[in-house]
Image: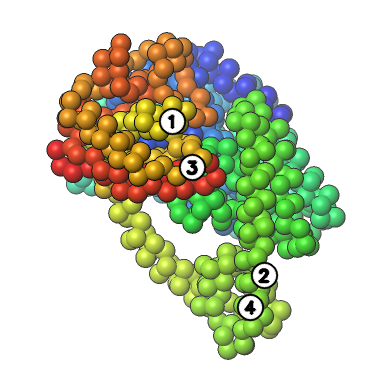
Amino acid sequence: MRSADLRKKYIEFFKARGHVEIPSAPLVPENDPTTLFTSSGMQPLIPYLLGQKHPLGKRLVNSQRSFRAADINEVGDTCHTTFFEMLGNWSLGDYFKQEQLPWILEFLTQGLKLQKDKLFHIFYYGVDKNWWSRSGEPASMPSGEPGGPDSEVFYDFGPSASSGQVHECHPNCQCGRFMEIANSVFMQYQKMGDGSLKELSQKNVDFGGGLERLVAVTEKTPDVFKTDLFIPMITILEHVSGKTYGSVEAETRAMRIIADHIKGAVMMMADGVLPSNKAQGYMLRRLIRRSLLYGRKLGLLKDLTYIVKLVEPVAAIYESAYPAVVEKAAEIKLLLQEEALRFGKTLERGLSEFEKATDSELNNLFAFNLFQTYGFPLEITEELYKQKGKTVDKKNFEHIFQAHQALSRRAAKGMFAGGLADHSKQTSRLHSAHHLLLAALQKIVDSTIHQRGSNITVERLRMDFNFTRKVTLEELKKVEELVNGKIKEDVKVERVEMPREEAEKVGAQMEFGHKYPDRVSVYFMGPRDHYFSAEFCGGPHVTHTGEIGHFKILKEESAGSGIRRIYAALSTP
């Protein structure tokens, strides 16, 4: 079954059962600095799972585009991808297990025509497997995190799909015979500060089914890269390399990694992420460079811009679901080409450093430096070492890597601490200041300015916006004065739910490229008939601007071609 047909069939199945379709949230979480990417369908719905009323009701359904950086080292097998779509349906305190489980079985067996004897979902593993939260089992959950027991569904491809390992096979083993395709989470608990689990005020259903895997099982293949979601990209890689997918394992793995990573990169850029050395931009750059390194396995060394040819098939795959990819295809091609040419020089330097190194210098620390400085994955370094009769001690390399990760986490802790997910007073003040800043930029600098990204921590706010030149010091001063003027006026901040069309008519600002439901939440700063600021937003905010405190612009800089960035902070009101 083609992916577009399966996506539509799933959404229509649950709409027929009283669910309202909601749009996919952006890949970069809106005003949530606690995580780099949206990695699950439930992530944008956390406030509603915790009890806040959703404007569209208690039964929701959608297909959420997602990215999981944690899976990057797993990519290359038949079923792992970094970018994926998660089909989801939710009950926010409405129905529960007795409705959800029969519905999922009905969709799989009648909607997708899967054989019932190929499905396993009554299989107990214990809390390490039969529990879901974003952070894993209960002991790993941070305070405030929701979670609950789950019911996973596995598809059995039969003994022939097994890797041949000698062991007692079961649904959750990793031999390749079984593939997890769906998971119903009964989200009814919240982790408390004392480590205990408290029953939520409502019992929720949070279902997630990977579109890529569901398409694969309808095609009776354990390889998601043999579906229409990847075949067009694989075909191009076969053509430019002269290699055949499936003939040589190392080459096949390389094709999977390149196809996955470039798709993820394209989808990130369609959501406004630009290559850089920080946050989301760093992960984007890593995907592109890792793809180019694996191109060496296919003999693709002379012209690294071959990755540009993969943009069109990605745009075609998601043309109906995510039209922004088509709209931005030309821009994405240019960005990929620039990155490929830039990394080509870095790749040459890295290989040059390797060739100059003596045998005694080819140790684990040197291998890590190739990874950290030049972006060489361990697999590539191992291949280079092998050519010189050397090996990499993987355990020692991993030890060096984990020391580095610990330092990075400590460095990033301040950046991501206390984000909007905790609805703290300080982030609410900065969030409201963020709205005032956008309105002031439009009034002082250029009325066509729109937000292109944001990041808010307890210490400061960051806003990215479209603009082709540097904002002058005089303009920044006027913007700052206007924001502080509105804070001094202590104007009312009001949240209003209204039809999307009405919100658009009154001129409420919206996130570029973001799809909104028919009914939206709008925050007005000032009277609705002559407001200072109005934005589509889910909150939280202060109730009056006087609560914000004194506003100060810290820095203005370039964040990429046609994108400027402002950092600002607040003093105590």
Numbered tag placed on residue 281 in the rendering: none
Residue 179 in the image, given as x and y percentages of width and height: 61, 43
Q: Amino acid at mark 1?
A: Asp
The residue that label 4 is drawn on is 354
Q: How far is mark 1 from mark 3, CA to CA?
A: 11 Å
**Mark closer to the observer (4, 2):** 2
Numbered tag placed on residue 469 in the rendering: 3
In front of the other: 467 or 269? 467
Which quadrant would residue 300 be assigned to in this image?
A: bottom right
Q: How far is mark 1 from mark 4, CA to CA?
A: 50 Å
Q: Considering the numbered disc 3 on the image, is that residue within a helix, a strand or a loop?
A: loop
Res 341 visible:
yes
Mark 1 Cα-neighbour bin, 10 Å: few <14, some 14–19, many ≥20? few
Image position of 80 (left or right of 422):
right
Residue 256 higher or lower than 477, as above or below: below
The residue that label 2 is drawn on is 348
Q: Considering the numbered disc 1 on the image, is that residue within a helix, a strand or a loop?
A: loop
